[in-house]
Amino acid sequence: MKRIGVFICHCGINIKDTVDVERLTQELEDYPGVAYIENYMFMCSDPGQNTIKNAIREHKLDGIVVAACSPTLHESTFQTVLKESNLNEFQLEIANIREQCSWVHNDIEQGTHKARLIIKTAIEKLKLNESLYPVSAPVTKKALVIGGGISGIQAALDIADGGYQVVMVEKKPSIGGHMIQLSETFPTLDCSQCILTPKMVALSKHKNIKLYVNSELESIDGYVGNFNVKIKQKALYVDPAKCNLCDDCTEVCPVLVPNEQEEGLGWRKAIYIPFPQAIPATYTLDVENCLGLEPIACGKCREKCTAEAINYDAKETIIEEEIGAVIVATGFDLYPVENIPEYGYGKYPDVITSLQFERILSATGPTGGEIYRPSDGKVPKEIVFVQCSGSRDPEHHLSYCSKICCMYTLKHAKLYKHKIHNGQPYIFYIDIRAGGKRYEEFVQQAVSEEGIVYIRGKVAKIYKNGDKMIVMGMDTLSGKKIEVEADLVVLAMGIVPSEGSHDLVKTMKINTDDKGFLSEAHPKLRPVESLQAGFYLAGTSQGPRDIPDSVSQASGAASKALILLSSDKIYHSPIIAWVDEDLCSGCTICVGTCPYGARELNQVSKVVEVNEILCEGCGACISACPSGAAQQKNLTDNQIDNMIKIIASGK
Amino acid sequence: MKSGYFPGCTLKTNAKNFEDSAMQIMEILGQPLEEMANWICCGTVFSMTTDDLMLQLSSIRNLLRAENQGYDELVALCSMCYNTLKRAKEFILNDEENLRKVNDFMYKEESTFKGTTDVVHLLSILKDRITFDEIQKKVTKPLKDLKIGAYYGCLLLRPKELAIDDFEDPSIMEELVDTLGGDGIVFPYRLECCGAYQTIIEKDVTIKRTYEIINSAREAGCEALITSCPLCAFNLDQRQKETSEEFLEFSTMPVFYFTELMALAFGIKWNKDWTKLHYVNPEPFLKKKGLI
């Protein structure tokens, strides 16, 4: 029989006021199995821990029950005490008499009674606990980063600088994401491309980073530290090794396609480099718009290419990689502007989105950084910005705040004012949310010095009158309907998870929230980890955020990944399922029940086995198993029976 | 499918031209309107109150009677009747307790209310069941060179659950005008409030609305307006009298029920009695366009 020590904590007055700890100590002294019992004000303190250590030594204890707070708080503290006393840490049981007892009761009699039952069940469970050792597995020391925006770039650079291999997968022909489209960045108004391109170049030159553009994740198998990944790369019609970037192919290409990089405000050819600083600097042949890969149909670019870099017969390839950790940085898209038909986007060329205005402001944009409106190329003398276009409208559109629009709209208004001094910007807003370092000052300076007019209220409708756009809205401060004449209207669109991320999360089997953003493991304390082990989240894939926050989170995700990659082995709690092979009939009910894919039928022995690394010990298979062959380690049917008997007896 | 026609109060009085013209075009389209028996007030604005079930009873009694008369659906012409009947039905049916209370109260009626009769607007029947292609085949006198603005107001489109078309950007009436050979013009104020019942207590509000809506239509190139709501028609047409007195530069514009223009396009002779129900005499306009 085990010699069990019971240690009851007062937690100051948290427990002691509702649980009579002295009485419990006396009553449980003679309980079968209890060799030693003591109470103390703070068991988690150093003196408290020493009390346990001394008792283990002096009374030759081989099992410990600590009656205190929730095991989520101090279980590991006391496990360390056991380890330091040369006991197996799984000979510890925490009886939670605080959160589940003293905090939820007022009456000391009832509280004491309930604490007594809780401690007894812990003693009964401990009696049958086995000594267990953590499960371990090797770690592949390579990370996969999905998405080549600023978040993905930062995470990849951090991991690569940490000395580990990185594979980056980007769907588009170049990395850079949305940030490369931006003109300037708030609140410092420094040029977005100027601060991003050094990082892009660094990434492309890094010896530890392998970049696949025009590529997507095809499949991912395995488990944390040991993923097998398949990447599908579109056909490389232009061989980057042979291409000398002469641009002759683009010149002869007869096809014009709306340029995605310019948000449709400019044109590109069907064979193109997306933008001057693109990484990698290689040409992409857009098969969907190309007149045909058959030379009979067109073939102009291949005829013209003296370097013979163009190969119409190229095929898509599947690349296989072994990966230890995955960073998901799949970014955002704008909320579909077609969903707000009353704003007239698409009908009126002078109603544009915020990203289109970024391109108009950008020195590399379709107007070379000069502000002209799309319809007739006039300089807009009056410009209206509509904040919360699609955001904070739970009845019709997005319920949430897209977080960045207040600041980027203000940036737009300032940049407009800096270029068109006699122009008048108006901003419709609900609230100004400027919570960020130097953000409020950025707002105040604009309001007091730049002559930007803020109108508090939502816009109901936008229509055209002559060559002016009329913005109809409500000024909620005066309570009046107002109409503002404008030459150009910019809709500050809300942001949603990128379109491609929806399929990707299914491929990776990671969780998203009800809006489609990736779910973090804990909203406050584990914000960069997915609940699925080995997946880390960076940037706007997890929720709306600006560049500083995206970069911080990317570095956070990278450091979490580095912890994993720098471990020789990964360890996993041994409190998992096991199978009694004599009882298992191989019915495979458990295989369908397991949410982690940890159950598999052994085709030879016809018994279902447990993958110890994948098993999270949720217990689903154990309750589903019709023969009782599946058991949880240290939570067997016998242990649960004994615990129920205590509770049922009420004594 | 048995369809019943629900007229409501105005269609028998101030909007008789709406009913007459609708009856005639539906004859031509082969789906004559059959008036339900024993109809009462649709409930009007009162049934929009949601904290007093008594105010839903008029609407629900109509629906219950339609059920008992074996109608699968009730067709409304008046936007207000459509809105109140449909809204009351959803409000009562979607809440078990409401349904129980209303049925308990109506224990003397022939049967309990089950909500088996649908409520549809004539415009939806024209577009979805008869289809505009079929309507086009019946056009003998196309509305050539008629620039017509469709005024929707609120009751066909709000709340969005009841909307007969996209509630922010509808097109059903413009499409209908185009089908009849005219030119359906989208104008900015076509969904703005007409002033509704403010016309009784705050007449000035309505006059200002009328002024803005008609001017908005004229600036967009409209020569006349169509509507499906007798209240809108009253505010936009009859109130042009006071609008002209208030704003001296204001010039009037004829306002039709959409069925009146359909009747003309189908070759039906213009009824002099209809003219009497208009404030702005439409005859000069129709003569100029060669329609009468």
Image: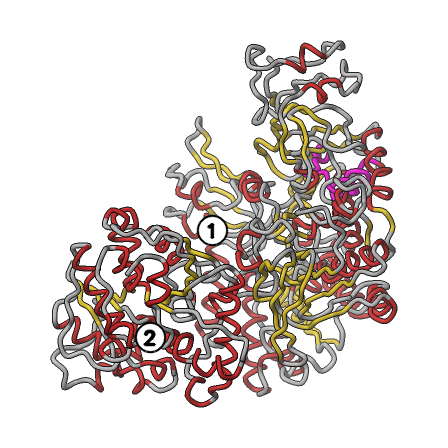
Q: Residues within 10 Å of mark 1 (few under 14, many from 20)?
A: some
A498 shown above or below A480: above
Q: Nearer the viewer, residue B26 or A17?
A: B26
| Rendered image: mark on residue A620 | 1
Mark-to-mark CA distance, 2 and 1: 74 Å
Measured along the vertical axis of the image, is residue A151 above or below residue A645?
above
- Compared to B107, does A327 lie above or below? above
The answer to if B83 sits in the magenta stretch is no
User: Which quadrant would residue A393 be assigned to in this image?
Assistant: bottom right
The residue at which mark 2 appears reads as B278
Q: Is residue A481 above or below residue A199?
A: below
Type of amino acid at the residue the image marks with label 2? His
Image location of residue A555, percent across then percent down: 79, 47
Q: Three-letter amino acid code at disc 1?
A: Ala
Which mark, residue A400?
none
Q: Residues within 10 Å of mark 2 (few under 14, many from 20)?
A: some
Q: Residue at x 77, y 61 (%)?
A: A410
Q: How is the image coloured?
A: secondary structure
- Say whether residue B195 is left or right of residue A364: left
Residue A183 at x, y percent in the picture: 80, 47
Question: Is residue B256 visible to the viewer in this orientation of the structure?
Answer: yes
Q: Quadrant of residue A460?
A: bottom right
Q: Quadrant of the C terminus of chain B?
A: bottom left
Q: Is residue B93 visible?
A: no
Label 2 close to label 1 by CB (< 8 Å): no
The answer to whether residue A139 is magenta is yes
x%, y% of residue B128?
29, 53
- Residue B241 in which image quadrant: bottom left
- State the extent of the magenta-drawn residues as a range: A137-160
x%, y% of residue A186?
A: 82, 56
Element under label 1? helix
Q: Residue at x 38, y 83 (%)?
A: B49
